[in-house]
Amino acid sequence: MLHSRVHNLNGDSTIMMPLQKPWRVVAHLALGFTLLGTTPARAETLDSTTADTRTFLAFKVKEDAAAAWLPEGYAPGVVPKGPFQSANFMLMFIDRLIHLSPEGEPKAGGAYRMAAVVIPGRHIESGKPVQFIARIYGPHDGSGPYANSVKAAVRRELTRSGADISPLGGADAWEVDHDGGRLSVAFAFRAEVPRYVESESHPTSAADPSIRRIYRYRQLVDVVRSVPAEIDRLDNLRVEVSIPELVDAFDGSEQLIAVGVIPWYARETFLP
């Protein structure tokens, strides 16, 4: 059954976000969201170089709905502070402008769109935080780099406009069709000057925790909606979910925590 809701984000007020602590959290985004500690890298092999634009939404969903995506021995976590505080379920929409092999040749077609489910978790015995890539929806056949990709039709419509020295605002819309259902997100936003971020993250596959990647990336981030940081520069946000494996998380009890726009993201991916 289609689950559709227009979130109450139509107010015109704009509240500036504090410039320090929240952005220290934003600085740990991978697939938009690391938000967890990283560990020093050892032997590494370059896997690919990518450049994207991205959109992310952070939610707080029922704990058992998040736990259902995680491997045995792990439990859901939450973002502990910052503009995504209390979120435990992330949707990342990725418009891949270019994907290159270590030799500089186009990889996986070179350009495509995809979406990912990202869940902060923790090892039950050690308590160590782990960022899990739980699902990737994309146009390619096969299980993908995290052994959990499924084929999906992913479409995006993006408009941007601005004048003189004002940042580019606009409207962003995504549709992901899979397994007879759809994940649809659309909103208009008023932009501010984005933050430049350089960081590193170590995401892990929820299908097989032995599969990890090292991401070293640079990005521009504009958090356009955050409940903890009292930011609201969105209009007419709509989130519709009818993909069967997602409907339990989006049953009407979910809470939207934050929305972010990443107009530029450049990354090198390494195999540990």
Image: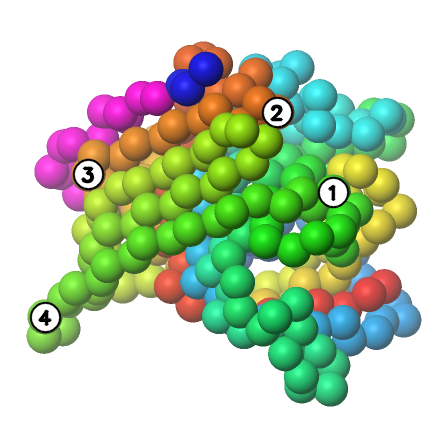
Q: Residue at x 37, y 38 (%)?
A: 185
The amino acid sitting under disc 4 is: Ala
Of label 3 and label 1, which has the lower sequence position?
Answer: 1
Q: Residue 198: x percent and y percent?
A: 54, 68
Residue 245's disc is 2
Mark 4 or mark 2, whichever is nearer to me: 2
Quarter containing the C terminus: bottom right
Q: Residue at x 27, y 42 (%)?
A: 187
Q: Residue at x 59, y 31 (%)?
A: 179
Residue, disc 4: 163
Of label 4 and label 1, which has the lower sequence position?
Answer: 1
| Residue 104 against residue 18 in the figure, above or below | below
The amino acid sitting under disc 3 is: Asp
Q: Residue 62: x percent and y percent?
A: 57, 15
Residue, disc 3: 235
Magenta stretch, residue numbers = 4-20
* Mark 3 → mark 2, Cα distance in angstroms: 28 Å
Is residue 80 shown to the viewer in this render? Answer: no
Residue, disc 1: 148
Quarter containing the N terminus: top left
Mark 3 or mark 1, whichever is nearer to me: 1
Local SS, label 3: strand
Mark 3 or mark 2, whichever is nearer to me: 2
Asked if residue 66 lies in the magenta stretch, the reply is no
Q: Which is nearer the eye, 247 or 133?
A: 247
Mark 4 or mark 1, whichever is nearer to me: 1
* Mark 1 → mark 2, Cα distance in angstroms: 13 Å
* Mark 3 → mark 1, Cα distance in angstroms: 33 Å
Tell me the crowding category of disc 4: few under 14, some 14 to 19, or many 20 or more residues within 10 angstroms, Cα based. few
The amino acid sitting under disc 1 is: Asn
